[in-house]
Image (tube, grey):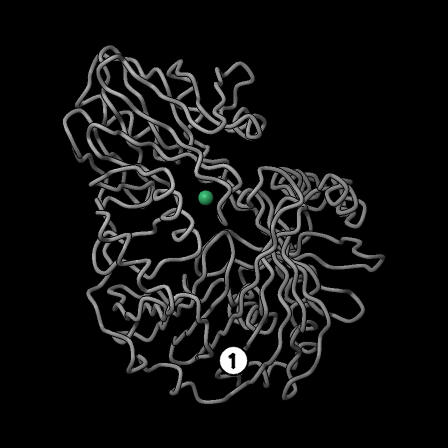
Amino acid sequence: MLQTARSFKHRLKVTYPNGEKNVHSKSIVSFIVLALSSSALFAETLPLKSVNKAGAVIDAAIAAHGGAENISNLKTVVRKSDFTNIATGQSRKPGPPYDRNQAWNFNAIDLEKDIFVAKNKGEGGGYVFKQGTVINGQNSWQLDYRAGTAAPIAEPDFNTQSGPFVRVTPVLLMRQLQSRRNTSNWLGEADLDGRKHDVITLVMEVGPALALYIDQESHMLTRMERVLPPFGQVEYRFLDYTMVDGIAFNQKFQLYVNGDDNLIIDIKDTQVNVPLDDYLQVPSNLDKVAAITPAEFGSQEIDEGVFLIGGNGTYSLFVEMEDHVVAIGGTQTVPASIKEMRKEIADKPIKYGVLTHHHSDHVPGAAAYAEEGATIITFEENRQVVLKAAGNDQAKLEFVEDRMTLTDGDRTIELYNIGPTPHAENILIAYLPDQGIIFEADHFPQPANGMIPPAVPATAAFARRLDELNLEYTKLVGAHSPRVASPEDVKKAIGYKSASTVGGQQ
Ligand SMILES: [Zn+2]
């Protein structure tokens, strides 16, 4: 990965008039201040010059991507693509090389009517999915082909939903430039793959501003970037242009996050100005169910002294022991959950913070546990990932291999490694034998309400391990749901198995 980052830096040499080398707001400001002092007498101020220069670059780019008329007359775009996702921080093992997951994608956009359709199916991380989103005013739907459900979207947001597709489709970015040209600035020149580029900004309806690299000779968009906290720098590359009905479309796309490969898209088919009606209907074989509403942050006492606390799709389990608390789960809501827990258990320290696995969304809680002075329980393989997440080299770690028992003599918590599963090489569940409670992460996806979806491969592996371990339980809770499931729910999910393994065409 270091290699990628290094070559990435060599490839890209940005040169600004004042010698700064990065797209950095500070360098832009100092460039403006420097130039203003020497050119204050001229009528064309620097900001104006920058907007004018951007305007000239935009005009040439629009001409090269199909021409102002073609681009203005564009009504619909339909694209089918193959996605290869590089599962950085979400692979079965904690370090590189990361797993590559495949997905098939369909996107359709109607630019006049603010209609957007996205469908995708694929697999990865022990999951299989086949789903869709239709954004069409009052007729907006979330489709889940595996569960066989269609849920209405109460507040459809065309700009937010279509943004990811717009950002990977050059002609749609050109349309944005066309309509918002007065907000674009010329940032400077950059050498990219040995070719000179102009760098201009684009402010979209939603999200942080984009920097677009336009080749000075071909006037094509070849690169784009934006800074997206907390992920860092996202780099987009547009490759292999071809003309479709007089408009330039890239056939390949690559995304890098902080210089590392993140996503490769191979575009298989592009159509323009075709009607979208067929894509807007809810398929008749899907059941219309109630809208999904986000669950509010809160605490549930699952059993005496056992609290499931969280919100926004992430939860932790807190178990009150004789003179301390054991916390299980490592998602980003851990600090808020600890605060909430203090309303129930005011004066006992957290002695152990148990992390289920190494995935990037299940380790941020390590920082809060380290701050509490707790010992973090994880696998030895995860040492680096956990110390980094804790932001503290001195964080106290204790390693599990196959199982570990935490007890105060009265109450007992058993930790089991149920890995390897299709989701992670090593993964812990917590079992409270006296209360019949199991806490798991990422192996039993259960929506806050409504039907339990058919088992994914990770769920099947989880159920098999529960059988092997012969754990008797009545309540199953998880890191991503406020719902308390039962063994019957697990059986039901597994029962759908035949449906879950068939992908099918749509
Ligand atoms: Zn995970």
- With respect to residue 340, does 35 lie above or below? below
Foreground residue, 69 or 265? Answer: 265
Percent position of residue 187, x then y: 67, 52
Q: Residues within 10 Å of mark 1 (few under 14, many from 20)?
A: many
Residue under circle 1? 78
- With respect to residue 439, does 166 lie above or below? below
Foreground residue, 78 or 506? Answer: 506
Foreground residue, 46 or 427? Answer: 427
- With respect to residue 43, does 378 lie above or below? above
Residue situated furthest right in the rendering: 194
Q: Amino acid at mark 1?
A: Val
Q: Is residue 124 left or right of residue 15?
A: left
Percent position of residue 228, x then y: 52, 46
Foreground residue, 173 or 501? Answer: 501
The quadrant of the rendering that contains the N terminus is top right
Q: Is residue 367 left or right of residue 146?
A: right
